Image: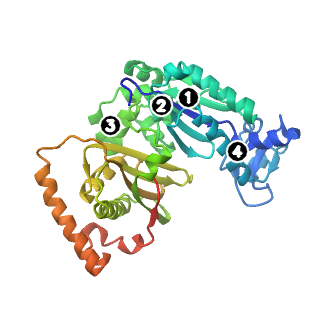
Amino acid sequence: MTAGPRVILHIDMDAFYASIEQRDNPVLRGKPVIVGAPPDARGVVSAASYEARRFGVRSAMPSREAYRRCPDGVFVRPRMAVYERESQHVMAILREFSPELEQISVDEAFLDITGTERLLGPPLDVAGAIGKAIRERRDITASIGIAPNKYLVKLASDMHKPDGITVVPEAQAEIEAWLAPLPAGKIWGVGKKTEAVLAGTGVRTVGDLQAYSRERLAELFGEWGQALHDLARGIDNREVQTEADAARSISREHTFGSDTADREELERTLLSLSHEVAREARQTGMKGRTVVLIYRLSDFNKHTRRTTLAAATDLGKTLYEQALKLLAAIRPGTPVRLIGVGLTGFGEAAQTELFGEERDARWQMSEKAVDRLAEKFGDEIVVRGREVEGRRARRTTQKAGSI
């Protein structure tokens, strides 16, 4: 990685489904297009053109409500295969500028262009060239953010839609000043309930939140308060994860029968998943430095949070401890549909923890002993105390191929 601040772009296609429908059927251009179920059927809006959004139509809104708000809207059935093909064309354009691409949905992606300035020019020029290529070659538009990390750049790309470019400053003081006037609800993970709680303490903007110490926020919100402290200051150490990175990983995920906000259930599930991932790592003789928390909320979008350790590990105990820390980023009370744990960063150089070696060796002996028992008598022979209550439900855990 090049020294100095990272330069990350977030490319977010504008009203992607609706824009494709307007492009492919010129009669729809300039009209309020609503992609989703027809208004006389049960279903929701998948996407709305900007003309429809002026009437308050939004994705995930019941189609009947969308019709009530916009009776002149043109309802179009989704063509997912068409959208997927178009997504592939757009991602191919992005890869022309950098191989460091992380696609996070059909219509958005992160692109790390750190160190490419001598080849491609300044970041603003790169973003402009990307936007131009998408417009000219695909006849649709994208809004693009430029920032030193993924959290900030995703905020930025949403600020000047459609077809806009937003640049976040690099210096920490300037980042905090840039964030300060934004509503507190703009912070990643802050929903309506948390926003209301914050308002009750006098916090209405990110700047208001910046005035609180880490300790005070921890008193108010527990571990989530510590995450709030960092997010209010624009701190996010996640790296752009390419497809190649994802392939070099071990992960396990569990989909709940119904969305759950039960913290104990989430923690029990993470405990089991962490030990499953660690066991496979030991079986394959690999240790990794990056622990990943994977989760899907009720909006069906998959999210990841990650942390990098000083020393590589294959211990379930270590994975679980780190997964719990990452879990703090999910606002308490938020319903979770899926949760998972991943381990990656295999073969990376790592510093040695002199005082942790003996401790880790004891844990490794213990976990390897459990491995042997499980191999001989089956997974059910050893059940950790916290797993007992949730073990039966955990049998539906799915094995994930990537994170």
Amino acid carrying mark 4 in the image: Glu
Mark 4 — residue?
Answer: 86
Mark 2 — residue?
Answer: 152
Q: Nearer the viewer, residue 128 or 320?
A: 128
Counting every numbered tag in the picture gives 4
Whichever of labels 1 and 3 marks the residue nearer the N terminus, that label is 1
Report whether residue 23 is seen: yes
Report whether residue 163 is seen: no
Q: Position of residue 171 (x, y in %)?
A: 40, 19
Residue occupying the point 46% across, 27% down: 114
Name the quadrant containing residue 362: bottom left
Whichever of labels 2 and 1 marks the residue nearer the N terminus, that label is 1
Cα gap from disc 3 to disc 2, whole angstroms: 21 Å
Q: How is the image coloured?
A: rainbow
Mark 3 — residue?
Answer: 217
**Callout 1 environment at 10 Å: few (<14), some (14 to 19), or many (20+)?**
many
Cα gap from disc 2 to disc 1, whole angstroms: 8 Å
- Whether label 2 touches label 1, CB < 8 Å: yes
Res. 129 mark: none
